[in-house]
Amino acid sequence: MLANTQIFQILINDEDVMNISKRKFIQGSLYSGVFAVLGKATFLQSAFAEYPTAAFDETEYEPALKGLIGDAEMQEGNVTLDAPEIAENGATVPVKVSTDLDNVEWISILGDKNPRPWISRFYFHGKSKPFVSTRIKLRESSNVVAIVKADGKLYTSKSAVKVTAGGCV
C-alpha cells in the first residue's frame, strides 16, 4: 500500500510528467476546438441551404406550393404516405413518409387547409434511408401532401385526413 502511495506522489511532483500532460491536454483541446468549429460550419451551411422562407410565410396552399417547388412538375408515385383517414385530435396527427428512390435531397409535408400550409422539410445526405415519422397539426379536415426531391425531380403523394377536433388556431 505504501509503495502505491509513493509512486503516486512521485508522478504528481515530477514536473516533466506534468508538463507532458499539460501539453497533450492543450493540443487535444486545440484540435477539438478546430474540429468543432469546422463541423459546426459544415452543419450550418447544409441546414440553411435553399430554405424557402417565403413559402413558409404563405397562408394559402397554392402560393406555398409554388414557393417550395416553383414551376417544376411533380410526378405521382414512388412515395409512400401513411396518414390516418380519421384523426381524433388535429394537434397530433401521425404521418410517415418513405420512398425507395435514390439520392433523396429532402422530403416536405404540407396540409392544404392549414393557416400555414407548409408544415416541415427534412433533409437527407448521402446514402441515408429516406424515411420520416412525425406528428403534425391540422386545423381541419384536409389533404396531407408529401413531396420528395430526388435526383433533381419531384415526386408526390397525398392522403385525405378527416379531423374531428382541430389543432391549429
Image: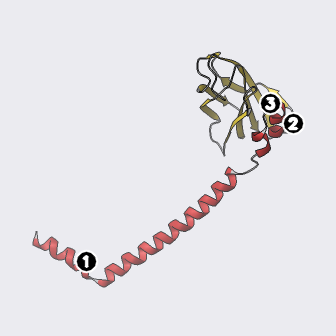
Q: Are marks 3 and 2 in contact (CB under 8 Å)?
A: no
Q: Which mark is residue 61?
A: 3
Q: Amino acid at mark 2?
A: Ala
Cα–Cα gap, marks 1 and 2: 69 Å
The answer to which of 114 and 34 lies nearer the viewer is 114
Residue at screen point 82% across, 40% down: 67
Q: Secondary structure at mark 1?
A: helix
Q: Position of residue 140 (x, y in %)?
A: 69, 21
The answer to which of 50 and 58 lies nearer the viewer is 58
Q: Secondary structure at mark 3?
A: helix
User: In the current view of this chain or complex, which residue is farthest to the left?
Assistant: 2
Q: Is residue 164 above or below residue 53?
A: above
Q: Is residue 29 above or below residue 39?
A: below
Assess disc 2: are there few (<14), some (14-19) or many (≥20) residues with their C-alpha within 10 Å of its C-alpha.
Answer: few
Foreground label between 1 and 3? 3
Q: Position of residue 42 (x, y in %)?
A: 65, 57
Q: Are marks 1 and 3 in contact (CB under 8 Å)?
A: no
Q: Which mark is residue 72?
A: 2
Q: Which mark is residue 11?
A: 1
User: In the current view of this chain or complex, which residue is farthest to the front?
Assistant: 169
Residue at screen point 56% across, 64% down: 35
Q: Is residue 94 left or right of residue 141?
A: left
